[in-house]
Structures are given as structure tokens and as C-alpha cells.
Image: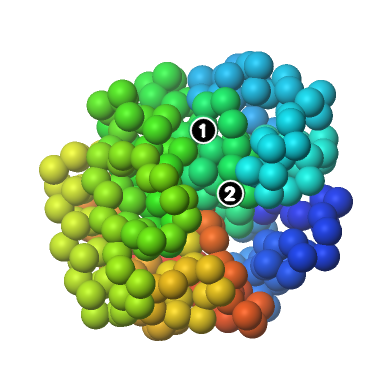
Amino acid sequence: MRIAYCPIYHLPLPPKHRFPMAKYDLLPQQLIYEGTAEAVDFFAPEPIALESLFLTHSRDYYERLRREELSAKEIRAIGFPLSQKLVDRELIIARGTLDCARASHRDGVAYNVAGGTHHSFRDRGEGFCVFNDIAVAANVLLQSGEASRILVIDLDVHQGNGTAALFAQEPRVFTLSVHGERNYPLRKERSDLDIGLPDGTGDREYLAIVAEIVPRLIREHAPDQVFYLAGVDVLAADKLGRLGLSVQGCRERDRLVLQACADAGVPVAVSMGGGYAERLATIVDAHANTYRVGKTIFG
């Protein structure tokens, strides 16, 4: 099992952001404590090379970030205070997802304890997303020939608007977003397949959709790489989610996706995505389930 770990302890964040961000440091500890993973499974990615970043994001956007020249409006859209440390961490997250995709070619699955920054566009960020880690990794694989057909399975509760826009004209990448229809972002982009769900959608309805659509898309699109955004903000306990899944239902969702990839022999790189429940233990447990299920399926 290969797991990219991108710590957040060095980020200058206000107190309101510290609580939900703590999951990034607590999850590795939990996985090691319970024996799902070992310390040797974790690796610290280097920052993504700029020539790789520029396959997805504009040079001007990066330079304005680096010089901290974004407008107040642009910074508010991102949601985090702008700093060089934030930019550096986002470069590391993007490289982590790329490294995980490459590791998944050997192991079947690999995980980034971060990522899922699907609200980032070519020349702007929003919704706590600066660079789009999945898009960056996918574009590198396409350019290098390491992948020729990619499927993005985005099951975060928020639509992957940045990812949809970035690949709108790219036939080699199929984007699926299953999300809360009335949730952020207010203005949705067009994925290759969008499934917007009403508030309160629970386990039965949600899992029926995943069980039908994911194996079908794998058969029809025939990807040689899957990126799975496994947000746990679909939980009923989530403060921002507005859907109604139980922790057990969220775990079954992960099992359905990862089993479909394993059955088809398609490598899958998993990014964490959102999770904002009142209890930090609920968030960590729900995220840990993704790794627990993956270990059962892939070993």
C-alpha cells in the first residue's frame, strides 16, 4: 500500500480552519495505530515540476500566486489566506496524486491523504482549492503516454466544477460527478456525466446509483487509469453536505467503486476530498474506511 502524506502543520491558518484540517494529520496516525497501514507505506512527495503544472494551470496564475498578487476577491474565493507555504503544499499535493497514479499501476490502488482539489480551474482557485491535483496528474499521464483513457469518479458532495471545465474539450478523460444538486457551487459546470441529488438522499438511493453507474462507465469508457475522489461530506452528519448517508453507507460506496476497479483490472488513485462533520472522530473514521476497504480488496 502506497500513501502520499502531505502534512499541514506548517500552514498559517486561522482557528476556524484548524479543526477540519486536523484530519490530514490524524488519519495516518489512526491507520498505523489500527494496523491498516504501516509507517513504511507512507511517503512524502516532492513538489510537482512546474512544466507538469503548466499542462493544466496557466503560468500567469502560478506567478501571481507565487508573488502573492491575487486580489482580495480571488483570495476570498479560495477561502484560505494566501501564503507561499499554501502554494508549496498545493504543489506537493498535486505531485502526491501523480505519484499515487503511478504506484497504482503496480499495486492496483494508491492513496493521497490530501487532494481532491476539484474546484480549481486553469487560471483561478475556489472552494479551498488552489491547484487541481487530479487534473494535473491526469494531464501528465496523458502527455507521457502512461495513460490514454482516464475516468474521473468524483463522489464528493460538491460538484467537481473545476475538473469538468478543465476536461470539457478532452475526449480522453471522462468526468463523472455525483453530488448534491443544491450544494456548492451555485453555478455548476458540465461534466461528461452529472448526477445531482436532492437534499437528504440516503444510503439506499445513493448506493443504487453508484452500483449501476460506476461499473457501466468502466465498461463503456474502458479507462486505463481511474482517479477516485472519495469525499466523506456525503454523510448525514456533515455540516456542509446536506445528503443523508450513514458511515456504513459511505464505506459501501467505497467498496463498490474500488471493487469495480479491481474487477476490471484498472488502477485507481484515490484522493481524499471533503469531510466536515461536527465530530473529528467521525471524519477520520469515514476516511479510514476507504483504506480499510481498499486493503480488503487489493491486499
Label 2: which secondary element: loop
Residue 85 appears at what percent x and percent y? 82, 40
Q: What residue is shown at x 83% (from left), y 59% (from top)?
A: 14
Location of residue 145 by image quarter: top left
Q: Nearer the viewer, residue 109 or 251?
A: 251
Q: What residue is shown at x 14% (from left), y 47% (from top)?
A: 219
Query: Which residue lies under the disc numbered 2?
Result: 127
Q: What residue is shown at x 64% (from left), y 30% (from top)?
A: 48
Query: Which residue lies under the disc numbered 1?
Result: 121
Residue 229 seen in the current view:
no
Residue 227 appears at what percent x and percent y? 40, 46
Q: Label 1 vs label 2: CA separation?
A: 11 Å
Up/down of 150 relative to 117, above or below: above
Residue 69 appears at what percent x and percent y? 78, 26
**Neighbours of disc 2 within 10 Å: few (<14), some (14-19), many (20+):** some
Label 1: which secondary element: loop
Q: Quadrant of the C terminus?
A: bottom left
Residue 108 appears at what percent x and percent y? 39, 51
Residue 130 numbered mark, or none: none
- The reply, left or right, for residue 90 in relation to residue 57 is right
Up/down of 57 relative to 221, above or below: above
Q: Are marks 1 and 2 in contact (CB under 8 Å)?
A: no
Q: In the image, what residue type sits under mark 1?
A: Phe
Q: In the image, what residue type sits under mark 2?
A: Gly
Residue 215 seen in the current view:
yes
Up/down of 200 relative to 211, above or below: below
Q: What residue is shown at x 31% (from left), y 41% (from top)?
A: 191
